[in-house]
């Protein structure tokens, strides 16, 4: 079975359901992505590019997938998983990205539930080498949350060169 197919059923904890996102979740995922960019980096994402970026993942699942937390039919949290091939480990790392929980549901364990479901699914697949994420240096709240889930600071430092024309694949 290919890595990107998610043959799981919904996972429920109380009233919160953790499930793979569907394409009809795209509007709320896009809205949440724009909110997290504003909150964490002070970035205003172009709504059209953000929309196309979300849809692109649904249209090309070999790039990754979204997981959402739903309460009474409303998406209250989310994250995106993308894949990075590791030739050293002959497997993929699942990168946790685009993490967002609606402000009124923070500090209630919503991301913990999402993370635990991702962790469980990753451990079930022999081709997953591990989980990774990056976090803003000043986001100590997120760092504490990730540490409490068993993640640790890696020995790597992230470098980048961002292009002004980012998002051109989706235009």
Image: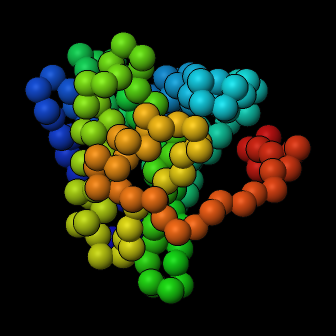
The correct choice, above or below, for 157 with respect to 88 in the image is: above
Q: Position of residue 128 (x, y in %)?
A: 37, 71
145 or 33, which lies in front?
145
- The reply to whether residue 104 is visible in this rendering is yes
Count up the numbered dots. 0
Residue placed most toward the observer, 166 or 141: 141
- Residue lying farthest to the top in this orientation: 104
Relative to 40, say whether 56 is above or below.
below
Q: At which x and y percent is residue 2?
A: 39, 69
Residue at (25%, 66%) from the top-left corner? Answer: 123
Q: Identify which residue is drawn at 48% across, 64% down.
A: 154
**Residue 99 visible, this angle:** no
Residue drawn at the location 54% of the way across and 51% of the way down: 134
Q: Residue at x 87, y 45 (%)?
A: 165
93, 145: nearer the viewer: 145
Quarter of the image with the C terminus is top right
Q: Quadrant of residue 34?
A: top right
Q: Is residue 140 left or right of residue 169?
A: left
Residue 94, x across and y down, in percent: 44, 61
Q: Residue furthest left?
A: 14
Q: How is the image coloured?
A: rainbow
Q: For residue 157, what is the image quadrant?
A: bottom right
Whole-percent x and y of residue 164?
88, 44
Query: Which image quadrant: the N terminus?
Result: bottom left
Left or right: where does residue 165 sit relative to residue 1?
right
Q: Is residue 126 above or below residue 151?
A: below
Taking the image as shown, residue 82 lies to the left or right of residue 46, namely left
**146 shown above or below 151:** above
């Amino acid at each position: 079975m290919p890595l990107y197919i998610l043959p799981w059923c919904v996972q429920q904890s109380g009233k919160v359901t953790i499930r793979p996102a569907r394409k009809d979740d795209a509007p709320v995922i896009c809205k949440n992505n724009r909110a997290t960019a504003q909150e964490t980096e002070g970035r205003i994402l172009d709504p059209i590019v953000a929309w196309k970026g979300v849809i692109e993942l649904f249209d090309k699942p070999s790039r990754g997938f979204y997981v959402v937390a739903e309460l009474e039919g409303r998406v209250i949290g989310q994250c995106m998983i993308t894949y990075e091939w590791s030739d050293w480990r002959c497997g993929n790392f699942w990168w946790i990205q685009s993490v967002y929980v609606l402000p009124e549901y923070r500090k209630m364990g919503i991301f913990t539930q999402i993370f635990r479901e991702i962790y469980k699914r990753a451990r079930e697949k022999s081709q997953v080498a591990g989980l990774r994420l990056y976090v803003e240096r000043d986001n100590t709240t997120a760092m504490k949350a990730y540490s409490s889930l068993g993640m640790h600071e890696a020995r790597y430092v992230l470098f980048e060169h961002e292009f002004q024309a980012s998002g051109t694949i989706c235009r």
